[in-house]
Image (spheres, coloured by chain):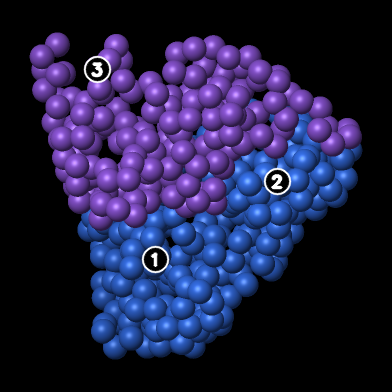
Chain colours: A blue, B purple
């Protein structure tokens, strides 16, 4: 299958890419890892007249720790984040990176591309919603930093202007005593999850001090189930409070019936995943090593 | 080529051999390998980034060559299934696939073996989970995967033995 013909432009730097976007106008699209864009182009759902290739830009795929934050260059590939010592300081990042699609896709796909595409079934936006995450956006007019919660606007829609690109994702490391886990349920490795749940919480003794939850694939954008967070915050962690949070998340999810399952099935799945993710996050918050990965049907 | 679209020159090293070619930007890497270089061992299965039949190594990393433009491979080192056999000797991975009945129709096999090659070049003693994760992006509709799994375990052992032999 061939995409429609396009003009190809290779950017040598982020600045050059921004200049190209500004010159070429709205018909131009950015190509990073291409693991979403190229399939969309082959199916002719996307037909850009011009493609600006970012993949030859050097120095834009760093992963480093600085002043309590993990800074990730937009072109860092999922596989690089999966193996990164710096990123492993926030375990939920590795849960996500190591489970996205399959080895081949993780070797190409980038974190910046995933966030900028804003697919409702993407993994990164859901995970990063539970952490203080800033998206650094670059254009010829300068830089602006947008909090992730304001960056994702709608399905496939972000706060990016057409002449802007993502240059960096910066994630504040959660305080000591905080633990997080991300569990996505998939029918097979290469497909998008049917539903996914990210949980980040702080525990003092048996009491949950802070909780942040995000649900993926069950609405046009990741859902923050505030009632579920309230069901945990300030409460003793017990089967009862976890069940209450799961029930609140089930209600907050707004899934659609599609080839991955009925809306009711997805709600049930969200409830079960919330329970598992909370249990893993609590154990991690207490300092235990817990392995969490995407689940296959 | 449509008006206003020019071809781009690329240089790639495929299986140790240098090639310089002019390509249309929308040419997929898998089509470039099969049609321009006549390396038809790399297969096109689903053509939608699912099945992994088109897997090749790009600078040592397994990629789906149906989901990359040839222009993006400019300057890269590519390994395809044709590079496994040397001087009439099967690669230990190929031999293990034959010995363990790791294939039936053979359509997915080139991709399976290239995914195995990335794994075994990074982990000489992979555990069961590592092997299963390594081929999670490769679909086989014949074998049920069990013999493929056994083949990769056997290839790992054979490579470890030849490491000790050297």
- Pick out the residue farthest to the front: B105
Is residue A106 visible in the rendered structure shown here? no
Instruction: State the CA–CA distance, disc 1 to disc 2.
Output: 28 Å
Residue A17: % across, % down: 76, 35
Instruction: State the CA–CA distance, disc 3 to disc 2.
Output: 40 Å
* Residue that numbered label 3 is attached to: B89
- Up-down relation of residue A224 to residue B1 (above or below): below
Instruction: State the CA–CA distance, disc 1 to disc 3.
Output: 39 Å
Query: Which residue is drawn at the image coordinates 39% and 56% (left, top)?
Result: A189
Is residue B100 visible in the rendered structure shown here? yes
Q: Secondary structure under badge 2?
A: loop
Q: Residues within 10 Å of mark 3 (few under 14, many from 20)?
A: few
Name the quadrant of the C terminus of chain A. Answer: bottom left
Q: Are marks 3 and 2 in contact (CB under 8 Å)?
A: no
Chain identity of mark 2:
A
Q: Are marks 1 and 3 in contact (CB under 8 Å)?
A: no
Badge count: 3
Q: Nearer the viewer, mark 1 or mark 2?
A: 2
Query: Which residue is drawn at the image coordinates 38% and 60% (left, top)?
Result: A188
Query: On the picture, is A148 further left or further right than B64?
Result: right
Give A241 or B98, whichever is nearer the viewer: B98
Residue B149: % across, % down: 21, 45
* Residue that numbered label 1 is attached to: A187
Query: Which label is found at residue A3?
Result: 2
Give B108 or B131, whichever is nearer the viewer: B108
């Amino acid at each position: 299958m061939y995409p429609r013909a396009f003009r190809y432009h290779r950017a040598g730097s982020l600045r050059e890419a921004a200049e190209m976007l500004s010159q070429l106008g709205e018909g131009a699209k950015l190509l990073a890892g291409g693991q979403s864009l190229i399939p969309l182009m082959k199916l002719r759902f996307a037909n850009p007249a011009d493609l600006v290739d970012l993949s030859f830009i050097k120095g834009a795929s760093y992963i480093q720790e600085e002043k309590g934050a993990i800074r990730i260059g937009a072109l860092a590939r999922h596989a690089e984040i999966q193996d990164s010592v710096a990123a492993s300081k926030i375990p939920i990042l590795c849960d996500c990176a190591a489970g996205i699609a399959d080895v081949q896709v993780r070797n190409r796909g980038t974190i910046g591309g995933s966030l900028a595409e804003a697919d409702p079934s993407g993994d990164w936006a859901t995970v990063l919603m539970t952490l203080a995450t800033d998206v650094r956006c670059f254009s010829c007019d300068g830089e602006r930093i947008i909090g992730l919660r304001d960056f994702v606007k709608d399905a496939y829609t972000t706060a990016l202007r057409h002449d802007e690109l993502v240059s960096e994702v910066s994630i504040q490391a959660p305080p000591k005593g905080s633990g997080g886990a991300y569990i996505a349920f998939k029918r097979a490795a290469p497909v998008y999850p049917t539903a996914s749940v990210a949980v980040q919480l702080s525990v003092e003794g048996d009491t949950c001090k802070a909780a942040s939850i995000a649900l993926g694939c069950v609405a046009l954008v990741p859902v923050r189930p505030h009632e579920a967070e309230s069901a945990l915050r300030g409460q003793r962690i017990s089967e009862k409070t976890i069940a209450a949070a799961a029930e609140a998340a089930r209600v907050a999810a707004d899934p659609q019936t599609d080839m991955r399952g009925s809306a009711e099935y997805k709600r049930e799945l969200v409830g079960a995943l919330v329970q598992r993710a909370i249990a893993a996050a609590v154990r991690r918050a207490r300092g235990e090593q817990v392995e969490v990965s995407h689940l296959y049907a | 080529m449509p008006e206003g679209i020019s071809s781009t020159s690329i240089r790639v090293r495929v299986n140790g051999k240098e090639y310089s070619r002019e390509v249309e930007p929308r040419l997929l890497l898998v089509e470039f390998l099969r049609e321009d270089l006549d390396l038809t061992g790399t297969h096109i299965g689903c053509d939608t980034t699912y099945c992994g039949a088109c897997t090749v190594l790009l600078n040592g990393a397994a990629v789906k060559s149906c989901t990359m433009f040839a222009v993006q491979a400019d300057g890269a080192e590519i390994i395809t299934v044709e590079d496994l056999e040397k001087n009439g000797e099967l690669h230990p991975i190929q031999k293990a696939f034959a010995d363990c009945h790791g294939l039936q129709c053979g359509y997915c096999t080139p991709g399976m073996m290239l995914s195995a090659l990335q794994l075994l070049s990074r982990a000489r003693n992979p555990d069961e989970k590592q092997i299963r994760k390594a081929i999670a992006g490769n679909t086989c509709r014949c074998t049920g995967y069990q013999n493929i799994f056994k083949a990769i375990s056997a290839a790992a052992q054979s490579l470890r033995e030849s490491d000790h032999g050297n």
